[in-house]
Structures are given as C-alpha cells and as structure tokens.
C-alpha cells in the first residue's frame, strides 16, 4: 500500500510539471504573437507610386528619353506629353494599358523615325509588376 501514496505524489509532481510546461508554452506563443503584431510598426510606408515611377524613370529612361518636347533625343523619342498621347492612342487601349504595353513590348508600335530594337525588351522580366505600375503612374502625369 505504500506504493499508492508514491504514485499519487508522482501524479501531483507530474501535473505540476505539465502545468509549468503549458504555462511556458503559452508565454512563448504570446511572445511570438506580439512580435508578429508589432514587427510591422516601424516599417516605412510604401513609396508613393508616382514618386517611385519618377525615380525609375530617372534611373532607366532619362538617358534615352527626354521630357523636353524639343529634345534632346539621345536614342528614343522625347516623352513630353506621353500621358496625353497614351490616352489618345488609336488602338482602343486605356492610357495605362498602352503605356504598360510600350514598356514591356517597346516594338509593338514604333514611333516614326526610330527603328525597332533600340529600347530593351526585357523590362517585363526585369521590373517587378509594382515597378511597372509605378512607372506607368508617373508617365500618365507627364505633360
């Protein structure tokens, strides 16, 4: 009969150990949830698409496309008024669709006086979709 009290004490110790384990696990899970919730608090806001598009234009386009209607035209046509030209395209595309297509498939419709193959055809793969959309947002406002 002396074995029964030992078993009971072991059960009590076992339950106490289990409760402590559950408590530690609960605290650990609560910490993980808190880290997940608060980790995004210090993230900067996503960039303004137009500002990001202007940044991309400056890096990737300005070397060949001027915003000055009179040029200079290093390699490609000036992009002054491109937003209005995109809106008045004869293909029935929205201005955004037209610009997007011109970025990813620059030889689809050629500007008179400029041969095919001058503009890189890899922007559709090189840029993330958000970058293309930012560039389109910027170009829509170029007058």
Image (tube, helix red, strand yellow):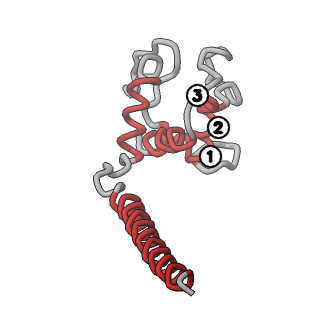
Residue occupying image coordinates x 33% and y 52%: 45
Q: Which residue is mark 3?
A: 126
User: Answer yes or no: do the residues labelled 3 and 1 have beta carbons within 8 Å?
Assistant: no
Q: Nearer the viewer, residue 72 or 11?
A: 11
Query: Residue 84: percent from the left, percent from the top?
Result: 49, 44
**Farthest residue toward the front?**
1
Element assignment for label 3: helix
Image position of 108 with respect to 92: above or below: above
Reading the chain from its start, which is encountered first: label 3 or label 1? 1
Query: Residue 49: percent from the left, percent from the top?
Result: 41, 46
Viewport quadrant of the N terminus: bottom right
Dot 2, crowdedness within 10 Å: few (<14), some or many (≥20)? Answer: some
Marker disc for residue 97: 1
Viewport quadrant of the C terminus: top left
**Farthest residue toward the left?**
42
User: Answer yes or no: do the residues labelled 2 and 1 have beta carbons within 8 Å?
Assistant: yes
Q: Is residue 67 left or right of residue 14?
A: left
Q: Which residue is mark 2?
A: 101
Residue occupying image coordinates x 71% and y 30%: 108
Real-space Cα separation, disc 2 to disc 3, in angstroms: 14 Å
């Amino acid at each position: 009969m002396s074995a029964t009290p030992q078993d009971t004490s072991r059960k009590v110790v076992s339950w106490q150990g289990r409760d402590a384990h559950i408590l530690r696990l609960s605290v650990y899970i609560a910490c993980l949830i808190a880290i997940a919730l608060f980790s995004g608090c210090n993230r900067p806001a996503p960039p303004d698409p137009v500002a990001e598009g202007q940044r991309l234009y400056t890096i990737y386009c300005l070397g060949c496309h001027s915003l000055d209607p009179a040029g200079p035209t290093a390699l490609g046509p000036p992009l002054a008024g491109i937003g209005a030209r995109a809106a008045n395209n004869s293909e029935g595309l929205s201005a955004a669709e037209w610009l997007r297509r011109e970025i990813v498939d620059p030889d689809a419709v050629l500007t008179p006086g400029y041969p095919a193959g001058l503009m890189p055809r890899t922007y559709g793969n090189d840029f993330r979709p958000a970058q293309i959309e930012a560039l389109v947002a910027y170009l829509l406002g170029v007058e």
